[in-house]
Every structure is written in structure tokens, then in C-alpha cells.
Image (tube, helix red, strand yellow):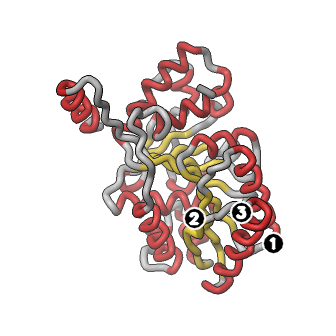
Amino acid sequence: MFVDQADKLRNMVNSQNNNIRIANNSKVIAITSGKGGSGKSNFVANVAIELVRNKKRVLIIDADLGLSNIEILYGVMPKRNLAHLINGKNTIKEIISEGPLGIKLISGGRGLKELNDIDARTQKKMLKEFAYLDDYFDYILIDTGAGITNIILNFVFASDKVIIVTNPEPTAITDSYAMIKLLKEGKEDIDVNIVVNKVEDIEEGKNSFKKVHMVCKKFLNLEVKGLGIILYDEKLNRAIKKQVPMAIEYPKSDYSRNIKLITDKIINEKYSVDIDGNKKGARGFLKKILGM
């Protein structure tokens, strides 16, 4: 059962002073990569588990237009997706699927393409529905598709933070830089966090991050942040075949320990507060997607 405690708190304070509004905004984080094969979806699936273990309420929006990787990794088959909400067939609560450990999941499906073509009435209804997400979830993780498309860029620009998952391969580093360059051109104050995945050792991970950091500083005048390094772990393939995330199947593995360290950083990061509740969180995210 969903409990709207934040809404009760707002109503109590507003009854005392009509000029005060408390906004409980979800922290919306887009996780993306410059190319496929970076391990992005596995990263999202396992970070979500560690967030829940830290008593955070988590929603994943699977925004991959191609393969619904999160659903596959969790062994979940959602019956509804974002299109059902847009078309008025279901409420946002009704399109949310259940993942492991209480993680919630929304499948984007064909609704991702329909977001840019909805009328004013539907926009208003969508904003009301998304306001519910702010009241219920602490974190909303957006698992974008791989590569660089307008839809992916729009989702990243609309989020509060962006995490780029890359690896030591030269092509992956180059593609990550290309993505960061486009993000910087579209949003001057973009908050970019880098995770270097599939490294043989810590030194390789550090060197890979230094390459990204150096070119971004030199050519974009942008300070990207190093969020963490994930060691290559052969047990990952076994977990994928079982459709059980590493953090559950192999919680003591190097991979899972690295994920936990990164998750701790995510939790301890400071997020700016939006008093009006219109610029950040789930509702602010949707407004930016809709160009409002």
C-alpha cells in the first residue's frame, strides 16, 4: 500500500500558513552511456538494490527504446507501460510493477515517443500523476538507452543529476566525451558524474577517469566528478543468466562491494532544494520533458 505521508505534512503546514509550501522532491538521476556494452543497466539494477537496503524508496524508469534491459535483469514482465498512462487507460500507480526487495519499475515502452505529442489536457493530467511520485519515492533512476539520441539527451537534461557509465576501451572513452560535450552545449551547469566499469584493477580505472577528466577540463572547461570504479567480475554473467542481480546473488563479490561504495556516495551527495516544487523532482522532470 502506498502511504502519502509527505502530502499530509504539506497540508498541515499549509493550514497554518497559506504562504508556505513544503515540497518533497524525488531525486531524479539519469544513468546513460555513450555506447552499448558499458554495463549501464546492470549498474542501475544493482544500485537500486543498495539504495533500498539503505531504506530508500526507489523507482526505476526503463527508458530504453530498444531493449528493456532492467525488466530482463529483474525477471519482471510489466503488463502496462507509460503509454497506458498517456492514453488515459491507467493511473501512474497502476503502471508501476514490482521488482526485487520492493523496488518499483515503470516501463517506458512506446510511451517515450508519445510524450512530445500530448495535448494540454493530457499534460495537466500527467503532471498531477507525476506529483504522486515526488511524495512517495526518494530516488527515481532513469535507465536511458545506449548511444546519443534526442530522446536520451532530453531525459538527461530533465534530470537532477547524470551518471555516465563507461569502461577503459578507447572507443568507450571517446563516446563518453562526445556525450559530455553535447550535454555541456545544452546545459552549461550540467552535473556530470563518471563511473568507470569493467576495469582489471583500480589503477586502470583511475587512469581511465583521468583521461575523461583531462579532455573535459581542457576542451570544455568542465569539471566532471569521479563517482567510482567497478572491477570486472566474471560472476556477473552467471547472475545475468539467472536474472538475479549481483547485489543479491553475490553480495560479497568485488562488483557488489564497488556498487555499495558508489551508492553510499550517491546517498551522501547534496541536492539543491526546490521550495516551489516545480523545477526538480518527478514533476519538474516531466515539465522539462514537455517543454513547460
Which of label 3 and label 1 is nearer to you?
1
Location of the N terminus by quadrant is: top left
Q: Mark 1: give few (<14), some (14-19) or many (20+) Cα within 10 Å.
A: few
Q: Is residue 97 placed above or below 101 in the rendered structure?
A: above
Residue 233 visible in the current orientation: no
Separation of marks 1 and 2 at Cα, in angstroms: 25 Å
Indicate left or right for 30 with 149 as reference: left
Image x and y of residue 12, in percent: 19, 30
Instruction: Tell me which numbered mark, 3 or 2, is placed earlier along the sequence.
Output: 3
| Mark 3 vs 1: CB contact within 8 A | no
Residue 8 rendering spot, x and y as whole percentages: 22, 32
Numbered circle sitting on residue 39: none
Say left or right for 248 vs 117.
left
Regarding mark 3 in the picture, which secondary structure is present there?
Answer: loop
Distance (Cα) linking label 3 and label 1? 13 Å
Which label is found at residue 37? Answer: 3
Which label belongs to residue 170?
A: 1
Of circles 3 and 2, which is in front?
A: 3
- Residue 130: percent from left, percent from top: 45, 31
Residue at (55% x, 40% y) in the render: 107
Kind of residue indicated by mark 2: Ile
In primary-sequence order, the first of circles 1 and 2 is 1
